[in-house]
Image (spheres, rainbow, N blue to C red):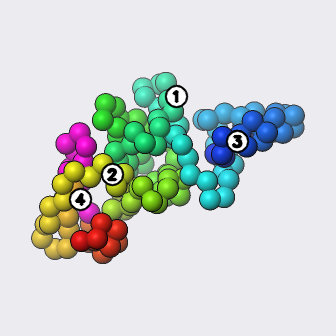
Amino acid sequence: MKIKLEVRNEKYKEIEEIFISLGIEIDDDADFILTEKNHFSDYICCRKNEDICHVLVSDIIYIESMGHDINLHTIDETYRVKNRLWQLEKSLNPEYFLRISNSVIIAKKKVKKIKAALSQKFILTLDGGSNVDVTRSYYYIFKNEFGI
């Protein structure tokens, strides 16, 4: 059996040793994830082509869901993520990240421009020039978070 650990760096080695002694393999590509309560990830495990990568959370501009595909965007690259958007949302610190639609999570500090649109929407320009929409369902959450 393989599991993925999402725990604080201080606890990682200790927990890893326990699982290995029980014959359980630690693998970032595992189907099962052990997550520490109230722990926010320092990195997200992704894929670039067939390579497995660890992307620092501080490098994330936004994450978007397109059907069953989840793409994580940084300034330089786009990565595929295995987790569902709701799982990623729970692993990211809400102090730094915000869900702005059913399909997009943004890094708050990466917002460069906010433009009001019709029908209770905003269009955001992020670092790197990407544009994403704040949908009506998230309009008041966004306004409250950004003090608009």
Within-10-Å neighbours for mark 3: few <14, some 14–19, many 20+: few
Q: Which amino acid lies under the numbered mark 1 shown in the image of this protein?
A: Ile
Foreground mark, 3 or 4, reads 3
Question: Can the viewer see residue 51 in this picture?
Answer: yes
Q: Quadrant of the N terminus?
A: top right
Q: Position of residue 69 (x, y in %)?
A: 41, 44
- Where residue 3 sits, quadrant-wise, is top right
- Could you tell whether 148 is left or right of 100 in the image? left
Mark 1 and mark 2 in contact? Answer it, CB < 8 Å: no
Answer yes or no: do the residues labelled 1 and 4 have beta carbons within 8 Å? no
Quadrant in which the C terminus appears: bottom left
Neighbours of disc 4 within 10 Å: few (<14), some (14-19), many (20+)? many
Locate residue 112 relative to residue 42 in the image: left or right: left
In terms of secondary structure, where does tag 2 sit? helix
For the residue labelled by badge 4, is the local secondary structure a helix, a strand or a loop?
Answer: strand
Residue ID at (54%, 43%) = 42
Q: Which residue is mark 1?
A: 52
Q: CA distance from mark 1 to mark 4?
A: 29 Å
At label 2, the amino acid type is: Lys
Magenta span main SS = strand
Of callouts 1 and 4, the N-terminal one: 1
Q: Is residue 46 visible?
A: no
**Label 4 vs 2, first from the N-terminus:** 2
Query: Which residue corresponds to mark 4?
Result: 133
User: Upstream in the sequence, badge 3 or badge 4?
Assistant: 3
Please tell me which of labels 1 and 2 falls first in the chain: 1
* Residue type at tag 4: Asp
- The residue labelled by disc 3 is 10
Q: Give the secondary structure at mark 3.
A: helix
Q: Which residues are magenta?
A: 125-134
